[in-house]
Image: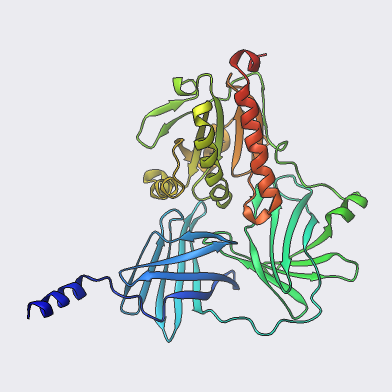
């Protein structure tokens, strides 16, 4: 009798099993402007605490909490200020994805069904692997973007790299004479159809409406096409002889300024960012890595954070952002995105989120880098990290007297 009672107690205390119909990989879509954006999605855990996972290539964005009640699924990503609310029915999920952004509350219809492997591989698959140049006239003054494609047979992963960062990894396959690639990682939904022309260029249809043309990088150079903007020369400051100034509150309400003792004689990276910003999510893990490696040698990092008004009142998403990436450096809550240009009056041609200013030990700006490429940009992602580290190491080697010359 006692054994039976103990077994019943243990059964009651055990975590509820995940319904068999939920655990595993799903083929999901969100609908944006009447366009279905397919993406890979996974669910794991148990019924008491299910976990959903978005992907950017091999990078994972796991939900921070969740629940299953009867036929309802709720998953939350606190660091995105987002959630999926869906009804479970006959092996499908139907509901909506809701996210708070700098533009307000965004809602996308959400649908998912169990993953099904692709059918037989198509034949006569063209090769589009490599780096391509896309001529453009962007609002940031760019004349060209890069398209980075990695291809294995019918499968391809691509990213468009702009001065502020990239689109994330758009993945998909070749079918019906074109590559159909898409991305959704909780942020930046995108759909891209890519066809190789007889002339060897690419015809691209982005999000069902924007038509682009891409030329292989070597051919673009031969033809004298415009080069993509160099992110290390995009933004500067009005006066290189004037220390970069900031004076804002941290999350505990304490005023922090560039003149504080903690920054005196240090190399400082001033990172202009926001927890709403997709490319800031790409850059932050690397900044955390830099800080841990070089802080003991004299590196400080300051995140000047700009959010929407609701988050300023209660920066829940920013706190979750800090927790997710393990940020140990200084984070200052500076105002809304609309106020940023007035509050950063020293900056010239600053229009990319994120942007990082490199300050020497004398507090003067020694360089700036607009945007940041994610791992979807392949070698260009690795190159950006190497350039950041080399710049930091170079500045750390300077003593105060040398940097003041």
Q: Is residue 84 left or right of residue 28?
A: left
Res. 246 visible in picture: no
Q: Give residue 48's quadrant in the image.
A: bottom left
Q: Is residue 37 left or right of residue 336?
A: right
Residue at (63% x, 20% y) in the render? 398
Q: Residue 109, how many percent across, how many down?
A: 50, 72
- Using the image, determine if residue 263 lies above or below residue 185: above
Give the camera-side residue of 374 and 334: 374
- Using the image, determine if residue 322 lies above or below residue 17: above
Give the camera-side residue of 343 and 5: 5
- Using the image, determine if residue 18 lies above or below residue 302: below
Residue at (55% x, 70% y) in the render? 40
Number of numbered discs: 0
Q: Residue furthest left?
A: 1
**Which quadrant, please, contains the N terminus?**
bottom left
Q: Give residue 93's quadrant in the image.
A: bottom left
Q: Residue 338, how many percent across, how many down?
A: 54, 42
Res. 218 visible in picture: yes
Give the camera-side residue of 324 and 78: 324
Q: Is residue 355 left or right of residue 131?
A: left
Give the camera-side residue of 105 and 379: 379
Q: Residue 183, how many percent across, how many down?
A: 61, 65
**Which quadrant, please, contains the C terminus?**
top right
């Amino acid at each position: 009798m006692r054994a039976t009672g103990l077994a019943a107690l243990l059964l009651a205390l055990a975590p509820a099993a995940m319904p068999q119909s939920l655990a595993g990989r799903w083929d999901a879509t969100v609908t944006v402007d009447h366009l279905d954006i397919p993406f890979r999605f996974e669910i794991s855990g148990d019924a008491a605490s299910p976990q959903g996972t978005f992907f950017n290539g091999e990078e994972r964005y796991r939900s921070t909490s969740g629940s299953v009640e009867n036929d309802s699924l709720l998953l939350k990503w606190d660091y995105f200020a987002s959630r999926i609310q869906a009804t479970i029915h006959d092996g499908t999920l139907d509901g909506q994805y809701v996210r708070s952004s700098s533009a307000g509350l965004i809602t996308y219809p959400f649908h998912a069904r169990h993953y099904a492997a692709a059918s037989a591989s198509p034949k006569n698959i063209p090769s589009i692997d490599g780096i391509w140049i896309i001529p453009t006239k962007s609002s940031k003054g760019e004349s060209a973007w890069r398209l980075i494609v990695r291809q294995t047979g019918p499968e391809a992963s691509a990213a468009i790299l702009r001065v502020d960062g990239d689109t994330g990894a758009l993945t998909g396959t070749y079918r019906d004479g074109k590559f159909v690639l898409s991305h959704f990682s909780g942020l930046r939904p995108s759909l891209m159809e890519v066809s190789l022309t007889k002339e060897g260029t690419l015809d691209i249809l982005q999000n069902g409406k924007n038509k682009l043309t891409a030329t292989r990088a070597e051919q673009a150079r031969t033809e004298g096409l415009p080069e993509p903007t160099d992110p290390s020369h995009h933004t500067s400051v009005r006066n290189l002889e004037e220390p970069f100034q900031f004076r804002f509150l941290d999350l505990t309400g304490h005023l922090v300024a560039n003149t504080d003792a903690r920054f005196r004689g240090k190399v400082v990276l001033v990172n202009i960012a926001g927890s709403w910003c997709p490319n800031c999510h790409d850059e932050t893990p690397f900044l955390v890595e830099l800080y841990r490696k070089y802080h003991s040698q004299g590196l400080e990092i300051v995140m000047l954070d700009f959010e929407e008004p609701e988050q300023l009142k209660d920066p829940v998403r920013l706190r979750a952002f800090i927790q997710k990436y393990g940020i140990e450096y200084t984070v200052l809550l500076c105002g809304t995105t609309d106020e940023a240009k007035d509050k950063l009056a020293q900056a010239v041609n600053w229009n990319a989120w994120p942007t990082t200013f490199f300050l020497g030990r004398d507090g003067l700006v020694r360089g700036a880098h607009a945007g940041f490429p994610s791992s979807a940009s392949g070698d260009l992602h690795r190159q950006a990290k190497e350039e950041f580290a080399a710049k930091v190491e170079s500045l750390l080697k300077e003593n105060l007297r040398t940097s003041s010359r």
